[in-house]
Amino acid sequence: MIIQALAFYLFAAITVASGVMVISARNPVHSVLFLILAFFNAAGLFVLMGAEFLAMILIVVYVGAVAVLFLFVVMMLDINFTELRQGFLQYLPIGALVGIILLVELIAVVGAWVVAPEAGLATSLPIPPPDQVTNTQALGEVLYTKYIYLFQTAGLVLLVAMIGAIVLTLRQREGVRRQNIGEQVSREATVEVKNVPSGSGI
Amino acid sequence: MDMNAVIRSVIASGPEIIVIVGACVLLMVGLVAEKRYGRLLVGATLAVVIAAAAATFALAGAPRTAYGGMFVIDDFAIFFKLVLYLATGLTVLMSGRYLEEEAIARSEYYALLLFALSGMMIMVSGLDLLTIYVGLELQSLSLYVLTGFFRHDPRSNEAALKYIILGAVSSGIFLYGLSLAYGLTGTTQLTDMATALAHGRATDPALILATIFLVTGLIFKVGAVPFHMWVPDVYEGAPTTITAFLSVASKAAAFAIVLRIFLDALAPVTEIWTVLVAVIAVLTIALGSFVALVQTNIKRMLAYSSIAHAGFALLGLVAGGPDGVASVMLYLLIYTFMNLGIFGTVVMMRKGDVRGDMIADYTGFAKTHRGLALLMLIFLFSLAGIPPTAGFFAKFYVLVALINQGYVALAVIAVLLSAVAAFFYIRIVMLMYMREPTRSFDLALTPSLRLVLAIAGLGTVGIGILPSWFLDLAQGAILTVMR
Amino acid sequence: MVDWIVLWDGYAWPGIIIVAQVLLIVVPLLLAVAYLTYAERKVIAAMQLRKGPNVVGYFGLMQPIADAVKLLFKETILPAGANKVVFIMAPMLVFILGLVGWAVIPFDEGWVLADINVGILYLFAISSLGVYGVLMAGWASNSKYPFLGALRAAAQMVSYEVSMGFVIITVLIVVGSLNLTDIVLAQKDLWFVVPLLPMFVVFFISTLAETNRSPFDLAEGESEIVAGFFLEYSSFTFALFFMGEYANMILMSAMTTILFLGGWLPIIDVAPFNWIPGIVWFAGKVALVLFCFLWVRATFPRYRYDQLMRLGWKVFLPLSLFWVVLTAGVVVAFDLVPRN
């Protein structure tokens, strides 16, 4: 158990620290790299909780794909961040005020928090005990039965996002020479086979 | 779920499935038939909408739930779905020529419109906060893209960007409220949530916080003060047909979930939100009415007008009870007809180099086009709430519900503010009838646009003549829990 | 004193064992990496009718050692404009990622460092991280060509990961488990290369792209962008990149072996074949796949960038998606759904 606890504090501390670095790093590329580190440690926390499937999916999807594109874009941006930050301090008092008010409100709320006694029952029902089925199987069993409607609709949301991205950005530019392999390989259009009578030439 | 439950669920969500499959087929058809067959796309979209409507009618009857209580088909959902089909159908009919005039005739337009429709249908049929949220995202995402459909117009880009950023923030707030509510009740299912809340303390600060977050997220979607800032910019920048669609369909779907969430799940904690919503409603009507006075762009003016109307409909929610709900539902039906009608006249002005979205463009319109001007007059009078048009009865029933519940002061304020609102509608009438034309009118009137105007005009006048029949229709379709 | 026993039995001794196991995997792996470079030069030389390395030691066998020593003793050059920390971290990341994947590889039944439930996902995750080393190197070098190389590599690896993911899903549908040992044992009767042959081909080509190997080595592209992302690297930082790339190749070959070629299982389970220990079978199969890597390099010219993207998105993605649906359909239709 000591090792689990140590690992937890290690992962948690790095997650929080890199989260802080994401917003405080001067260089945007460093910010993204710290974000990736935060994802990575969050995945570690998932593993500690026994949710190994979620941990791996977090890495595959967020670190392996989303953050790569993030990094890709941020690297190509040419932003002068010192210039952007110039007006920053000007709004600090207002921002701080709003933040403090929200914080006080949240503390007031959390201080009087009452969790409904039946809340725990309702949530723990669909999850089978971890020693009987693996994490992956347990997820699949609720995702494709109980929540199939939400699952499908969420898929539609992604489809619409994809269509939208294509609709808004795809442009047919003039003067782009595209390779048409079919045309290139096909012999009908370019090669003509003639039956040459022997002895006479074409 | 056993096989029978699966089949029952699939049948219950038949209309949604029809619309979604239709949208996917349209996407593929569009790849082949993009340029030449604009009409084919309009026809196909209409066919999908009509098929879905037929399926919805076939499913009418006793309320039934599906997908483990996440989805419901009741009279309330069916009423709203019919309003949505009407709005979508009329929007599609308006679009064909307009898209060609704006050179944005692409098949994805219709597919996205259908996806937005399916999202709204999922919203109005949602009996679970998660379903409602996912439906909301589906419709919002489609509408963000449609708003930015003029890719080369900075106004459209700006509109889409503002819409998506503010929409994402409001979705986040709504989701936060949802998670708090889940934490308090242990469920996201609306009816179960109401049961759980009935046992708890109504003054629990976490509950107040959750309610405020839910109100905030939903208020944004209906475009009420103080989350109305996106409305004018989005309405102005978006293609006019999409503005029309946004103003009626999106609003109707948003009100459907507002009614369902507040009067079903949050019914036990009415005292938390009633005052909040009442204040919001009054402020919304006031702001919409006063700011609309100074607008020169007709789309912006109609945006503020729609803010004011949203405030009026919210008053129906404050009244609550069967009468209040029925009045909101009737309000939205009537608003669909009259607002689509007025947007139809804005669409027809767009031809060639004429944008036709300034109020001044209508100067002297009545001198040359008497019939169309009369139609516009009817729509504007209806929006202003002048009897005997339908718009009058829309406001009338809301006020009746308010007074029955004892909110006399609110009713008086609402009447006074709608007198202010009448001014800017009648200003356009005056421009059309009292001034000499400064230019010749070249209208993009197609048979389908004429049909839209005819249907909208018929609806506006018809409900004005037979208001009680339509009120009965709405009263027959109120939420099951209110009966 | 009791505490000391607990500490020893509970932590120190298992720790020592784990370290020993790690060494047992890493040391042969590094040797394999070294001799893979030698094999590559020899194989390609043979295919091009040359002799290849033959000076250092018998048959040039000491050549990799000589190369390593040379790289070790050279000076590490840090470009003045480089982002130092990221610049140094990039090759270390590539090298470490080439090693950590081996934690879940089963060399024989039960011969695995960490027999985790989601082994295949772990491998997939590790392979998808490889792109960071390249991106960081390209960016931190603060130079044109490395940056171009990094951008190419990022787009390429993200693209081919998609179809690789679908191939893995196809295998998972047939096996019904994400555990690598289960995947191998499911091939007891028939290696998956037979029923899933198209997926095997897609997977093999995707691993070529994923490891930035020829004919998809556009990220290096010495004829157009000089050496791509590791242009500014020298001495041991360069060696780390090099070793990382080859360790990755071996890891990918091991993955191919496990997914399609039956891991440590003999070709048929009869007398002379099942006398040979599983680890030998495993190593032999990995060597075979590696040979294909080298063979491809000696045979094909480099792809153009648009061709690479077309192959990934327009050919492999639809094909693998179709096979996922087909496999799932067949599995359900003939009631072959694996239950465990």
Image (cartoon, rainbow, N blue to C red):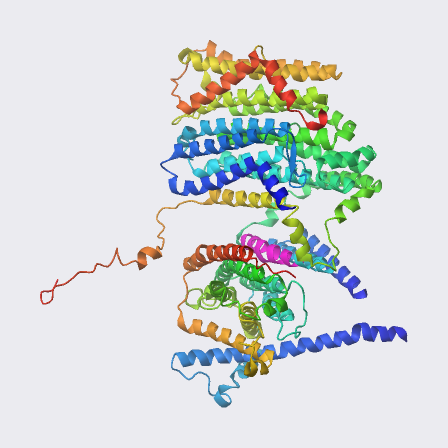
Q: Is residue C289 above or below residue A128?
A: below
Left or right relative to A45: residue B251: left
Q: Is residue B308 visible?
A: no
In the image, taking residue C1 as reference, residue B243 lies left or right, namely: left
**What is the span of residues highlighted in magenta in the rendered image?**
A54-74
B381 in relation to C5, above or below: above
Report the residue at 53% width, 21% height from top.
Answer: B337
Question: In the shown orientation, is residue C312 left or right of residue B181?
Answer: left
Is residue B236 or residue B465 the one in the foreground? B465
Viewer-nearest residue: C95 or C329: C329
**Of residues B34 and A144, which is closer to you in this image?**
A144
Q: Is residue A68 magenta?
A: yes
Counting from the top left corner in percent of width and height, residue B275 is at 75, 25
**Horizontally, is A96 left or right of A114 in the view?**
left
Location of the C terminus of chain A (image quadrant): bottom left
- Establish if C257 lies above or below B210: below
* Quarter that holds the N terminus of chain A: bottom right
Q: Residue at x 40, y 13 (%)?
A: B368
Rendering quarter of residue A188 = bottom left
